Image (tube, rainbow, N blue to C red):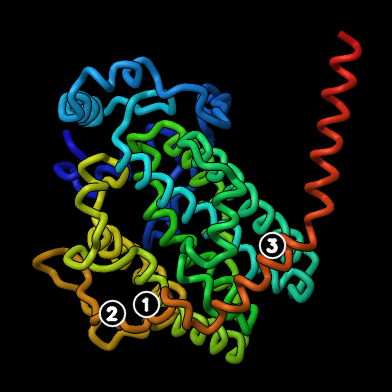
Amino acid sequence: MEPGEQGLGGFFEAIRHAVNCDTKNVVGATNLCHIASVPSKVEKCVYTQGLDSLGKDALHVASATASALEARFQARVDADDKIEPKDWMPDAYRHTLIRQISQHAHSEIVGMLPEGNWITRAPSLRRKAVLIAKVQDEGGHGMYLYSAAETLGISRDQMTAQLLAGTAKYSSIFNYPTPTWADVGAIGWLVDGAAIMNQIPICRCSYGPYARAMVRICREESFHQRQGFEIMMTLARGTPEQKRMAQDALNRWWWPSLMMFGPSDAESKHTAQSMRWKIKRFSNDELRQHFVDVTVPQAEFLGLKVPDPALRWDEASQHYEFGAIDWSEFNNVLKGNGPCNRERLDARRRAWDEGQWVREAAVAHAEKQKQRAARAA
């Protein structure tokens, strides 16, 4: 059965079993996914850092028609075969993956900044330790994803240069400020929650290295979501001032979180082709609807009000109806005019410049090790 036929609920259940995901109810309201363990064969997968060949098919490209190769490639995708780095693939497929995976990697790295801002100001030692671990996880996710993108023939330096030049995008959600501790909770609950909705289907992406990276990333993101929800629950059950802080964070992060799924299906340039290639398994609007259906009961359990006067449960469709998204805000942030766009890129450029000596030292050390090994041989 195809994912579209079994529906989002059935698909997420299938993924849960595929990666041994332990799903727990949050006081009977909704599900927060926690991937408890991963088969050892997945954890042992190692990415090829570069392409030493394009596979056997590439040797015969000149004598075979492009349409025949593409037909065979699409047949493999339709059969749910994994495409690996040395397999033949259309250039457009490769470029789409480079764009998507590098953007995902950049988002993990830039996403460290809003929460990292609170490490020195976390309200307790426990909160500080957990937040440090979370920010460290996000850095690791970026590394996994850069490695996956490198299997497609682009270098990490090239991707970094594109980010620092402003020609590569990252998730617009990270261009919003985090003025209170409740923002850390809202990011974990809403932003990481939306990320999980997007990323669990990618565990079955047609491109093998990307799919395998996402299994571990989703496992760790599930902890981040639960950590955020726990912060929001603590605040919502605290003093009136703390509950107002939690409500204010929800007010500010709700709509940007819905925008995380990308433009509506009617406006999306890439969704149809990405779904045909099984890079994506569900459309932007399907995932956004599932996020709303899951998250609204969580807000009700917390005693917080979703900032949408048009929000209502539709008994006929068994879904929540919600108000219109202000796409002008989304597009404005994408163009670099968000509250923190300039600050985020300046921080990454500064980190790159200040880390130059570390990179040079690492290269020099590697060269010395290579020379010593050669002499010993």
Foreground mark, 3 or 2, reads 2
Q: CA distance from mark 1 to mark 2?
A: 9 Å
The amino acid at mark 3 is Leu
326 is higher (above) or lower (below) than 169: below
Kindly indicate the quadrant of the structure image that contains residue 46. Answer: top right
Q: Position of residue 151 (x, y in %)?
A: 50, 34
Q: Which residue is mark 1?
A: 330
Q: Say above or below: 143 vs 302.
A: above
> Badge 2 local density, few (<14 within 10 Å), some, or many (20+)?
some
Which amino acid, by three-letter code, is at mark 1? Answer: Phe
Amino acid bearing label 2 = Ile
Look at 30% across and 47% down and name the residue there.
280
Task: Tell me the tag on residue 131.
Answer: 3
As drawn, is 17 to the left or to the right of 218? left
Residue 309 rendering spot, x and y as whole percentages: 27, 88
Front one among 127 and 208: 208
Label 1 with label 2: CB-CB less than 8 Å: yes
Q: Residue at x 58, y 78 (%)?
A: 342
Q: Where does the image place residue 62, in percent across and percent down from the top left?
A: 26, 21
